[in-house]
Amino acid sequence: MAASPTLRRRRLARQLLTLRAARGMTVDAVSKEAKKRRPDRPWSAAKVTRIENRQVQKVREADLLALLDVYNVTDSKERAAYVKLAKEASQTGWWVGYRDVLGSGTYVDLETEATELLTIEIGYVPGLLQEEGYARAVVIGSGVRDDTEVDRRVEARMIRRAILDRPDAPHLVALIDETAIRKIPVQVREAQIRHLLVPRPRVEVRIIPDAAGPHPALSGGATIMRFPHDPSVVYLEQTSGGQFLEEPEEVTHHEALFHAVKEVALSRNETVALLESAIRTA
Protein backbone atom coordinates (compact mmCIF):
# COMPACT_ATOMS: atom_id res chain seq x y z
CA MET A 1 0.00 0.00 0.00
CA ALA A 2 1.28 3.46 -0.88
CA ALA A 3 2.00 5.73 2.08
CA SER A 4 0.03 8.97 2.25
CA PRO A 5 2.09 11.94 3.51
CA THR A 6 -1.15 13.82 4.18
CA LEU A 7 -2.41 11.00 6.39
CA ARG A 8 0.95 10.86 8.18
CA ARG A 9 0.81 14.62 8.86
CA ARG A 10 -2.69 14.26 10.25
CA ARG A 11 -1.60 11.38 12.47
CA LEU A 12 1.51 13.18 13.72
CA ALA A 13 -0.44 16.34 14.51
CA ARG A 14 -3.15 14.37 16.30
CA GLN A 15 -0.64 12.44 18.40
CA LEU A 16 1.32 15.56 19.38
CA LEU A 17 -1.91 17.29 20.39
CA THR A 18 -2.84 14.25 22.48
CA LEU A 19 0.55 14.33 24.20
CA ARG A 20 0.15 18.01 25.04
CA ALA A 21 -3.37 17.47 26.36
CA ALA A 22 -2.16 14.59 28.53
CA ARG A 23 0.41 16.91 30.08
CA GLY A 24 -2.19 19.62 30.59
CA MET A 25 0.00 22.24 28.95
CA THR A 26 -0.91 25.32 26.93
CA VAL A 27 0.83 25.99 23.61
CA ASP A 28 2.56 28.96 25.26
CA ALA A 29 3.95 26.76 28.04
CA VAL A 30 5.12 24.18 25.49
CA SER A 31 6.95 26.79 23.42
CA LYS A 32 8.74 28.14 26.50
CA GLU A 33 9.83 24.66 27.59
CA ALA A 34 10.93 23.75 24.06
CA LYS A 35 13.00 26.93 23.89
CA LYS A 36 14.83 25.89 27.08
CA ARG A 37 15.72 22.52 25.55
CA ARG A 38 16.57 23.83 22.07
CA PRO A 39 17.56 27.51 22.41
CA ASP A 40 19.08 27.35 18.92
CA ARG A 41 15.60 26.83 17.38
CA PRO A 42 12.88 29.48 16.99
CA TRP A 43 9.89 28.70 19.20
CA SER A 44 6.54 30.38 19.78
CA ALA A 45 3.01 29.41 20.73
CA ALA A 46 2.02 30.05 17.11
CA LYS A 47 4.61 27.52 15.91
CA VAL A 48 3.24 24.81 18.21
CA THR A 49 -0.28 25.61 16.98
CA ARG A 50 0.80 25.41 13.32
CA ILE A 51 2.32 21.97 13.91
CA GLU A 52 -0.84 20.73 15.62
CA ASN A 53 -3.02 22.20 12.84
CA ARG A 54 -0.95 20.55 10.07
CA GLN A 55 0.16 23.90 8.71
CA VAL A 56 3.81 22.83 8.79
CA GLN A 57 4.71 20.76 5.74
CA LYS A 58 7.84 19.32 7.33
CA VAL A 59 8.38 19.05 11.08
CA ARG A 60 12.13 19.16 11.60
CA GLU A 61 13.59 16.32 13.62
CA ALA A 62 15.21 18.76 16.10
CA ASP A 63 11.83 20.40 16.75
CA LEU A 64 10.08 17.05 17.09
CA LEU A 65 12.62 15.73 19.57
CA ALA A 66 12.33 18.93 21.60
CA LEU A 67 8.56 18.48 21.80
CA LEU A 68 8.97 14.84 22.82
CA ASP A 69 11.34 16.00 25.59
CA VAL A 70 8.73 18.50 26.78
CA TYR A 71 6.08 15.78 26.76
CA ASN A 72 8.38 13.40 28.64
CA VAL A 73 8.47 10.78 25.86
CA THR A 74 11.71 9.01 26.76
CA ASP A 75 11.33 5.50 25.34
CA SER A 76 13.84 5.15 22.47
CA LYS A 77 11.55 2.98 20.32
CA GLU A 78 8.63 5.38 20.75
CA ARG A 79 10.81 8.36 19.88
CA ALA A 80 12.16 6.55 16.81
CA ALA A 81 8.59 5.81 15.71
CA TYR A 82 7.74 9.52 15.90
CA VAL A 83 10.83 10.44 13.88
CA LYS A 84 9.91 7.84 11.24
CA LEU A 85 6.35 9.18 11.11
CA ALA A 86 7.60 12.76 10.65
CA LYS A 87 9.90 11.70 7.80
CA GLU A 88 7.06 9.89 6.04
CA ALA A 89 4.86 12.95 6.53
CA SER A 90 7.34 15.14 4.66
CA GLN A 91 7.57 12.91 1.59
CA THR A 92 5.83 13.56 -1.71
CA GLY A 93 3.94 11.35 -4.15
CA TRP A 94 3.46 11.20 -7.92
CA TRP A 95 0.66 13.78 -7.69
CA VAL A 96 3.15 16.55 -6.86
CA GLY A 97 4.10 16.57 -10.54
CA TYR A 98 0.46 17.37 -11.36
CA ARG A 99 -0.11 20.23 -8.93
CA ASP A 100 -0.95 22.46 -11.88
CA VAL A 101 -4.16 20.43 -12.35
CA LEU A 102 -4.61 18.71 -8.98
CA GLY A 103 -3.91 21.65 -6.68
CA SER A 104 -2.58 20.47 -3.32
CA GLY A 105 -3.35 16.86 -4.23
CA THR A 106 -4.72 16.23 -0.74
CA TYR A 107 -7.65 14.14 -1.92
CA VAL A 108 -5.54 11.98 -4.25
CA ASP A 109 -2.94 11.60 -1.51
CA LEU A 110 -5.51 10.32 1.01
CA GLU A 111 -7.10 8.11 -1.65
CA THR A 112 -3.85 6.18 -2.07
CA GLU A 113 -4.00 4.77 1.46
CA ALA A 114 -7.73 4.33 1.92
CA THR A 115 -8.89 0.76 2.42
CA GLU A 116 -12.48 1.67 1.67
CA LEU A 117 -14.05 4.38 -0.50
CA LEU A 118 -17.79 4.94 -0.22
CA THR A 119 -18.92 7.45 -2.81
CA ILE A 120 -22.18 8.96 -3.99
CA GLU A 121 -22.11 10.74 -7.35
CA ILE A 122 -25.07 12.59 -8.79
CA GLY A 123 -23.97 14.23 -12.03
CA TYR A 124 -21.16 12.09 -13.36
CA VAL A 125 -19.36 8.76 -13.08
CA PRO A 126 -16.74 8.75 -10.26
CA GLY A 127 -13.21 9.60 -11.37
CA LEU A 128 -11.78 6.18 -10.49
CA LEU A 129 -14.33 4.55 -12.81
CA GLN A 130 -13.99 6.90 -15.77
CA GLU A 131 -12.94 5.63 -19.19
CA GLU A 132 -10.44 7.91 -20.91
CA GLY A 133 -12.81 9.30 -23.55
CA TYR A 134 -15.45 10.09 -20.93
CA ALA A 135 -12.84 11.62 -18.61
CA ARG A 136 -11.82 13.95 -21.44
CA ALA A 137 -15.46 14.91 -22.04
CA VAL A 138 -15.94 15.65 -18.32
CA VAL A 139 -12.82 17.86 -18.19
CA ILE A 140 -13.85 19.81 -21.28
CA GLY A 141 -17.41 20.02 -19.99
CA SER A 142 -16.11 21.62 -16.78
CA GLY A 143 -14.89 24.58 -18.82
CA VAL A 144 -11.25 23.69 -19.48
CA ARG A 145 -10.33 24.73 -23.03
CA ASP A 146 -6.55 24.57 -23.14
CA ASP A 147 -5.56 21.31 -24.89
CA THR A 148 -2.44 20.84 -22.76
CA GLU A 149 -4.38 21.26 -19.54
CA VAL A 150 -7.07 18.87 -20.74
CA ASP A 151 -4.40 16.27 -21.51
CA ARG A 152 -2.76 16.78 -18.11
CA ARG A 153 -6.04 16.40 -16.22
CA VAL A 154 -6.99 13.25 -18.12
CA GLU A 155 -3.50 11.79 -17.66
CA ALA A 156 -3.63 12.40 -13.90
CA ARG A 157 -7.07 10.78 -13.72
CA MET A 158 -5.83 7.68 -15.55
CA ILE A 159 -2.89 7.41 -13.12
CA ARG A 160 -5.29 7.68 -10.19
CA ARG A 161 -7.31 4.80 -11.63
CA ALA A 162 -4.35 2.45 -11.18
CA ILE A 163 -5.06 2.01 -7.45
CA LEU A 164 -7.94 -0.30 -8.41
CA ASP A 165 -5.43 -2.66 -10.03
CA ARG A 166 -3.25 -3.01 -6.93
CA PRO A 167 -3.26 -6.29 -5.00
CA ASP A 168 -4.33 -4.23 -1.98
CA ALA A 169 -6.86 -2.16 -3.91
CA PRO A 170 -9.39 -0.29 -1.76
CA HIS A 171 -12.94 -1.56 -1.58
CA LEU A 172 -14.86 0.95 -3.71
CA VAL A 173 -18.64 1.19 -3.39
CA ALA A 174 -20.01 3.69 -5.90
CA LEU A 175 -23.63 4.80 -5.78
CA ILE A 176 -24.27 6.61 -9.07
CA ASP A 177 -27.46 8.48 -9.80
CA GLU A 178 -29.15 7.42 -13.04
CA THR A 179 -28.90 11.07 -14.09
CA ALA A 180 -25.15 10.64 -14.46
CA ILE A 181 -25.62 7.73 -16.87
CA ARG A 182 -28.01 9.73 -19.04
CA LYS A 183 -25.52 12.61 -19.17
CA ILE A 184 -22.71 10.49 -20.65
CA PRO A 185 -22.08 11.94 -24.14
CA VAL A 186 -23.37 9.69 -26.90
CA GLN A 187 -19.98 9.38 -28.59
CA VAL A 188 -18.37 7.83 -25.48
CA ARG A 189 -21.45 6.29 -23.83
CA GLU A 190 -20.93 2.68 -24.88
CA ALA A 191 -17.24 2.68 -24.00
CA GLN A 192 -17.90 4.25 -20.58
CA ILE A 193 -20.77 1.94 -19.69
CA ARG A 194 -18.81 -1.14 -20.76
CA HIS A 195 -15.99 0.12 -18.54
CA LEU A 196 -18.44 0.20 -15.62
CA LEU A 197 -19.54 -3.34 -16.44
CA VAL A 198 -16.02 -4.80 -16.22
CA PRO A 199 -16.03 -7.17 -13.19
CA ARG A 200 -13.65 -6.00 -10.47
CA PRO A 201 -13.44 -7.95 -7.22
CA ARG A 202 -13.02 -4.84 -5.07
CA VAL A 203 -15.53 -2.60 -6.87
CA GLU A 204 -19.28 -2.46 -6.35
CA VAL A 205 -21.34 -0.21 -8.62
CA ARG A 206 -24.98 0.48 -7.76
CA ILE A 207 -27.27 2.80 -9.71
CA ILE A 208 -29.76 5.06 -7.92
CA PRO A 209 -32.75 4.83 -10.27
CA ASP A 210 -35.02 7.71 -11.25
CA ALA A 211 -37.87 5.59 -9.89
CA ALA A 212 -36.45 6.03 -6.38
CA GLY A 213 -37.59 9.65 -6.51
CA PRO A 214 -36.05 12.20 -4.13
CA HIS A 215 -33.27 10.77 -1.95
CA PRO A 216 -30.99 12.14 0.80
CA ALA A 217 -28.09 12.92 -1.55
CA LEU A 218 -29.92 14.96 -4.15
CA SER A 219 -28.14 18.11 -2.99
CA GLY A 220 -24.74 16.67 -3.90
CA GLY A 221 -22.39 13.73 -3.66
CA ALA A 222 -19.76 12.85 -1.09
CA THR A 223 -16.93 10.38 -0.59
CA ILE A 224 -16.14 8.66 2.71
CA MET A 225 -12.55 7.51 2.97
CA ARG A 226 -11.72 4.86 5.56
CA PHE A 227 -8.21 3.96 6.69
CA PRO A 228 -6.75 1.03 8.61
CA HIS A 229 -5.23 3.04 11.49
CA ASP A 230 -6.69 6.53 11.19
CA PRO A 231 -10.12 8.17 11.54
CA SER A 232 -12.34 8.32 8.46
CA VAL A 233 -12.55 11.48 6.37
CA VAL A 234 -15.48 12.80 4.31
CA TYR A 235 -14.80 14.74 1.13
CA LEU A 236 -17.40 17.04 -0.39
CA GLU A 237 -16.60 18.19 -3.90
CA GLN A 238 -17.61 21.76 -4.69
CA THR A 239 -17.25 23.99 -7.75
CA SER A 240 -14.88 26.29 -5.86
CA GLY A 241 -12.82 23.44 -4.37
CA GLY A 242 -13.33 20.48 -2.09
CA GLN A 243 -14.10 20.40 1.61
CA PHE A 244 -12.84 17.80 4.07
CA LEU A 245 -14.91 16.86 7.11
CA GLU A 246 -13.18 15.10 9.99
CA GLU A 247 -15.32 15.59 13.08
CA PRO A 248 -16.78 12.25 14.25
CA GLU A 249 -20.37 13.53 14.14
CA GLU A 250 -19.88 14.78 10.56
CA VAL A 251 -18.49 11.42 9.45
CA THR A 252 -21.30 9.56 11.22
CA HIS A 253 -23.88 11.76 9.50
CA HIS A 254 -22.50 11.05 6.05
CA GLU A 255 -22.15 7.33 6.76
CA ALA A 256 -25.86 7.24 7.67
CA LEU A 257 -26.67 9.22 4.53
CA PHE A 258 -24.64 6.80 2.40
CA HIS A 259 -26.45 3.76 3.79
CA ALA A 260 -29.84 5.46 3.36
CA VAL A 261 -29.08 6.10 -0.31
CA LYS A 262 -27.77 2.56 -0.76
CA GLU A 263 -31.12 1.27 0.48
CA VAL A 264 -32.89 2.82 -2.52
CA ALA A 265 -30.18 1.91 -5.05
CA LEU A 266 -30.60 -1.00 -7.44
CA SER A 267 -29.02 -4.35 -6.63
CA ARG A 268 -25.89 -5.38 -8.49
CA ASN A 269 -27.87 -7.51 -10.96
CA GLU A 270 -30.43 -4.75 -11.47
CA THR A 271 -27.61 -2.28 -12.03
CA VAL A 272 -26.06 -4.50 -14.71
CA ALA A 273 -29.44 -4.81 -16.44
CA LEU A 274 -29.96 -1.02 -16.45
CA LEU A 275 -26.45 -0.38 -17.80
CA GLU A 276 -26.82 -2.99 -20.53
CA SER A 277 -30.15 -1.45 -21.48
CA ALA A 278 -28.48 1.98 -21.67
CA ILE A 279 -25.98 0.58 -24.18
CA ARG A 280 -28.74 -0.85 -26.37
CA THR A 281 -30.62 2.45 -26.42
CA ALA A 282 -27.56 4.65 -26.94
Image (spheres, rainbow, N blue to C red):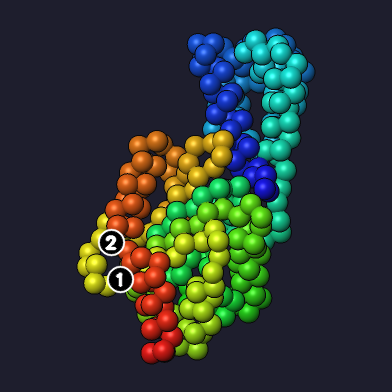
Callout 1 crowding tier (Cα within 10 Å): few <14, some 14–19, many ≥20: some
Percent position of residue 10, x then y: 57, 36
Percent position of residue 116, x then y: 51, 50
> Could you tell me which residue is drawn at 63 percent across and 68 percent down?
158
Indicate whether 24 appears above or below 8. Answer: above
Q: Secondary structure at mark 1?
A: loop
Percent position of residue 237, x then y: 44, 57
- Does the image show residue 185? no
> Could you tell me which residue is drawn at 55 percent across and 17 percent down?
20
Residue type for callout 2: Val
Indicate whether 179 appears above or below 188. Answer: above
The residue lying toward the viewer, choosing from 90 and 11, is: 11
What number of labels is visible? 2
| Of pointers 1 and 2, the one earlier in the residue sequence | 1
- Does the image show residue 277? yes
**Residue found farthest to the front:** 269
State yes or no: discs 1 and 2 in contact (Cβ < 8 Å): yes
Q: Which mark is residue 265?
A: none
Residue, disc 1: 209
The residue lying toward the viewer, choosing from 150 and 6, is: 6
Residue, disc 2: 264
> Could you tell me which residue is drawn at 75 percent across and 16 percent down?
76
